[in-house]
Amino acid sequence: MSSLIITTIQTNLVWEDKAGNLQQLEQKINAIEERTEVVILPEMFSTGFTMQPQLFAEPMDGETIEWMKKVAADKRIVLTGSIIIKEEDKFYNRLIWMLPNGDIGYYNKRHLFSFAGEDQHYAAGNKRLIASVKGWKINLQVCYDLRFPVWARQAPQDSLIPEYDVLIYVANWPERRSHAWKTLLCARAIENQCYVIGVNRVGRDGNNINHSGNSLVIDPLGEVLYHMADAEDIFTVALEKERLEEVRTKFPFWKDGDGFIFNR
C-alpha cells in the first residue's frame, strides 16, 4: 500500500509583507532535502492574519498564485496554504491546492472568526474540498473550521468507504488558546479515523498576538506522531495507508455514524 510523504512548515510570518514572506518560504521549501510530495504552509502565509484584505487581496492569476505554480513545478510537489483572494467584489480566505502541473483546487474558509472581525471583511465558503493524490483523499480546512466537527465529519459513501483519509488544517491559531487547538485536532482524528495534520505559525503578529505553533501530525487512533511548539520547524513524515486500513478494519466505528444530512 502506498505511503504519502508530507512536509509541514511552521514559520514566523512577516506582518503584511508579501514579498518578504514569499522569499523566506521559498528558501525554506528549497532547503528540504528529503523526498516529499505535499508541502503545507500556514493560513494567510503571504501576509499574516490581516483584516485589511483590500490592501493585499489578489486575483486567481496574481503574484502569489504564480509563485505557488513556480515553486510546485520546480520542486515537483503539491503546495498548499491559504491566501487572500478577491473574486466578484468579495474577499476570501482561500486555501489553495497547487499541483506541480499548475492545476489548482481551492477551498474558501467556511467558518469566519467573528471574534476578530473576520466575518466583517471576508465572505464565507459553502463547499468543502476533498482533494486526491496517489489514491489518498484529503479534506482541506482552515483554522477556525476546527471548532465545528460537523463540517469535518466523515460522510461514508454508499459502498461504506470513508469519505477521506487525511484532514488538514492550516492556521494562525493564537498561543492563548493552544490547549483547544491541540485537543480538537486529536478529537478530529479519533472521531473520523483519519490522519490529521495541523500547521500553525509561530511569532507575534501585527496585532501583538503571539502564536506558539504547536503544529501536529496525528494518526487515526489520535496518537501524536509529531508536535513542535515555540520554534520554526520543517518536518517531513510518511503517512502509511496500511496503518490507516488496519485501524479502520480493526475498529470500524465510522460505520456506525449518524446518517444525518446537512447543508454543506
Image: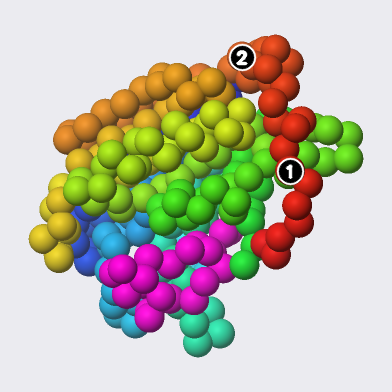
Q: CA distance from mark 2 to mark 1?
A: 25 Å
Residue 65 position in % (x across, y down): 47, 61
Q: Quadrant of residue 127?
A: bottom right
Amino acid marked by disc 2 = Arg
- Residue located 41% across and 19% down the image: 225
- Residue located 57% across and 59% down the image: 107
**Residue beneath disc 2:** 243
- Residue located 41% across and 53% down the image: 143
Residue 69 position in % (x across, y down): 50, 53
Amino acid marked by disc 1 = Asp
Residue 3 position in % (x across, y down): 60, 19
Residue that sits furthest to the bottom in the current view: 89
Residue 98 appears in the figure: no
Residue 71 position in % (x across, y down): 44, 46
**Residue beneath disc 1:** 258
Residue 170 appears in the figure: yes
Residue that sits furthest to the right in the current view: 158
Badge 1 density bin: few <14, some 14–19, many ≥20, Cα 10 Å: few
Q: Is residue 123 left or right of residue 118?
A: right
Q: Which image quadrant: the N terminus? A: top right
